[in-house]
Image: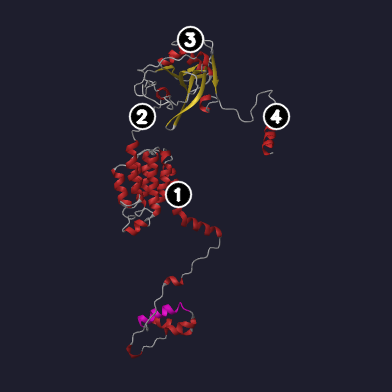
């Protein structure tokens, strides 16, 4: 240790050579036992003194956290890149969730880092948030998300990389994006193909998914003879017109609006009258005119009808099927349908084992005389529909009308459904106990 101090004093005076100074500085950091052995270098025969190089990182010791909370905070800071980007969408879209705010979030992420770190997690979070911003059917937004991927990084360079699924996580994310487009019925365009080729190449799984979509979508685009419009009308009366025409499927059917939605202010307060829209064809009017007045007709419903993501409900006016003794077989009209004849008279040579009858399953159902839609399916509202039908169908004034209304959805009832523990005044709980005992006995009988 004393030898090292002497050398340091000589260095401060300026006697030692620069090479020796470096050796001294390095030896000051070494243990005392090895300091002199490392510094004592022979300078005979004009040889230059050699000094040892050491990395400064070797002498830096990592700080040991004294508090376990500090270690947890450090771990959270390191894992920030793994956190989903849902908070980024929520912070930007505090005021309104629109297409402009969604594009702003994508632009902020794209400009934040050139290498696009965490782009897979960001794309998954963006695909999940698209329905909230109303851009799940926008092709430009999907192309904008494809543009988030780094270009020419995941393209395989040889057949071995293509065979071993080059960058599988990124390719799976691209396929997931195309699958969401397929689920919403969005067909990619040329820009989508160019982006996929630049990102993954022409021999990748996203490119095969794109080719399958472009093959099948044009085939099924016009396969439905009764397509539903992409943009449904927001007016409830117009939506009811569209729905009833779709159910009736009769060009001669006539849609009648019996009551428009309105609000009346009276002494008791505001009273809201729902809309009542009905439909009836000439054939249904003819069937109703031939109906026996001694047999009742029934108003039944509500029955659901889905139009894309909107569910509407309708009611029908029907009767029970006629008994077999009252049925009268009418002759078929040969000009009623030319595509599918209802009766065939074939004069052909047949064997005794040939069966020339049609195998048709007869379902005994009653006739449907009319249909209607209303936003409030109570008996008072449906009475207005029956009163309006009497103007064109006078027989309804002599036919008893019975209502078979089920518990419809909450938005059609106008009042909240009572809870499971609700019961009327004076109603006893004995009946429920008896039912429970009977169910218990049945369960025991089944187990035995």
Q: Residue at x 38, y 16 (%)?
A: 333
Q: Nearer the viewer, residue 83 or 285?
A: 285
**Residue 363 visible (yes or no):** yes
How packed mark 4 is, by other alpha carbons closer than 10 Å (few <14, some 14-19, many 20 or more), is few
The residue that label 3 is drawn on is: 395
The alpha-carbon separation of the residues under discs 3 and 1 comes to: 67 Å
Q: How far is mark 2 from mark 4, CA to CA?
A: 54 Å
Residue beneath disc 2: 225
Q: Which residue is mark 1?
A: 84
Tell me which label, 4 or 1, sits earlier in the chain: 1
Marks 3 and 1, the one that precedes in the sequence: 1
Q: Comparing marks 3 and 1, which lies closer to the viewer?
A: 3
- Magenta span has 399? no
Q: Are marks 1 and 2 in contact (CB under 8 Å)?
A: no
The residue most toward the bottom is 45
Of pointers 1 and 2, the one earlier in the residue sequence: 1
- Rounded to the nearest angstrom, the CA distance separating label 3 from label 4 is 46 Å
- SS label for mark 3: helix
The numbered mark at residue 196 is none
Q: Please say which color scheme the image uses.
A: secondary structure
Q: Which residue is situated farthest in the front direction here?
A: 352
Nearest the eye: 212 or 17:
212
Residue 20 is covered by the magenta coloring: yes
The mark nearer the N terminus, 3 or 2, is: 2
Q: Position of residue 131 (x, y in %)?
A: 42, 39
Range covered by the magenta-colored residues:
17-30
- For the residue labelled by badge 4, is the local secondary structure a helix, a strand or a loop? helix
- The residue beneath circle 4 is 434
Mark 4 or 1: the one toward you: 4
Q: CA distance from mark 1 to mark 2?
A: 43 Å
Element carrying mark 2? loop
Q: Locate residue 215, reporting x and y percent.
A: 32, 42
């Amino acid at each position: 240790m004393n030898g090292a101090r002497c050398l340091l004093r000589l260095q401060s005076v300026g006697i030692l050579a620069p090479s020796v100074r470096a050796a001294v500085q390095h030896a000051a950091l070494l243990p005392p036992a090895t300091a002199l052995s490392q510094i004592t270098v022979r300078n005979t025969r004009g040889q230059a003194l050699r000094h040892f190089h050491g990395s400064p990182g070797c002498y830096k010791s990592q700080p040991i956290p004294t508090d376990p909370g500090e270690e947890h905070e450090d771990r959270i800071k390191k894992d920030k890149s793994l956190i989903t980007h849902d908070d980024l969408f929520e912070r930007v879209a505090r005021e309104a969730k629109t297409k402009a705010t969604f594009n702003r979030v994508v632009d902020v992420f794209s400009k934040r880092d050139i290498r696009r770190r965490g782009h897979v997690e960001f794309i998954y979070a963006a695909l999940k948030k698209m329905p909230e911003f109303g851009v799940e059917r926008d092709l430009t937004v999907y192309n904008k998300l494809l543009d988030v991927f780094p270009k020419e990084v995941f393209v395989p360079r040889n057949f071995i990389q293509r065979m071993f699924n080059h960058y599988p996580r990124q390719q799976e994310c691209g396929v997931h994006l195309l699958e969401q487009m397929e689920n919403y019925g969005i067909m990619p365009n040329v820009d989508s193909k160019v982006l996929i080729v630049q990102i993954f190449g022409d021999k990748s799984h996203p490119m095969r998914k794109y080719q399958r979509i472009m093959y099948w979508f044009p085939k099924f685009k016009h396969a439905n003879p009764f397509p539903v419009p992409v943009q449904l009308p927001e007016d409830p009366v117009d939506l009811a017109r569209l729905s009833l025409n779709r159910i009736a499927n009769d060009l001669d059917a006539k849609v009648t609006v019996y009551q428009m939605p309105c609000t009346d202010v009276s002494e008791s307060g505001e009273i809201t009258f729902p809309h009542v829209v009905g439909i009836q064809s000439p054939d249904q009017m003819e069937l109703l005119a031939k109906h026996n007045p001694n047999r009742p007709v029934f108003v039944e419903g509500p029955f659901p009808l889905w139009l894309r993501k909107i569910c509407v409900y309708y009611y029908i006016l029907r009767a029970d099927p006629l008994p077999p003794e009252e049925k009268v077989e009418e002759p078929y009209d040969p000009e009623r349908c030319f595509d599918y004849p209802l009766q065939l008279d074939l004069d052909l040579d047949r064997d005794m084992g040939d069966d020339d009858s049609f195998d048709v399953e007869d379902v005994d159902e009653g006739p449907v005389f009319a249909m209607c839609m209303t936003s409030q399916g109570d008996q008072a509202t449906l009475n207005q529909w029956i009163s309006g039908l009497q103007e064109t169908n006078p027989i309804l004034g002599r036919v008893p009308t019975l209502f078979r209304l089920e518990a419809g959805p909450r938005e059609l009832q106008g009042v909240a459904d009572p809870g499971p523990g609700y019961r009327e005044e004076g109603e006893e709980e004995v009946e429920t106990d008896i039912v429970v005992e009977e169910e218990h006995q049945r369960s025991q009988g089944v187990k035995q």
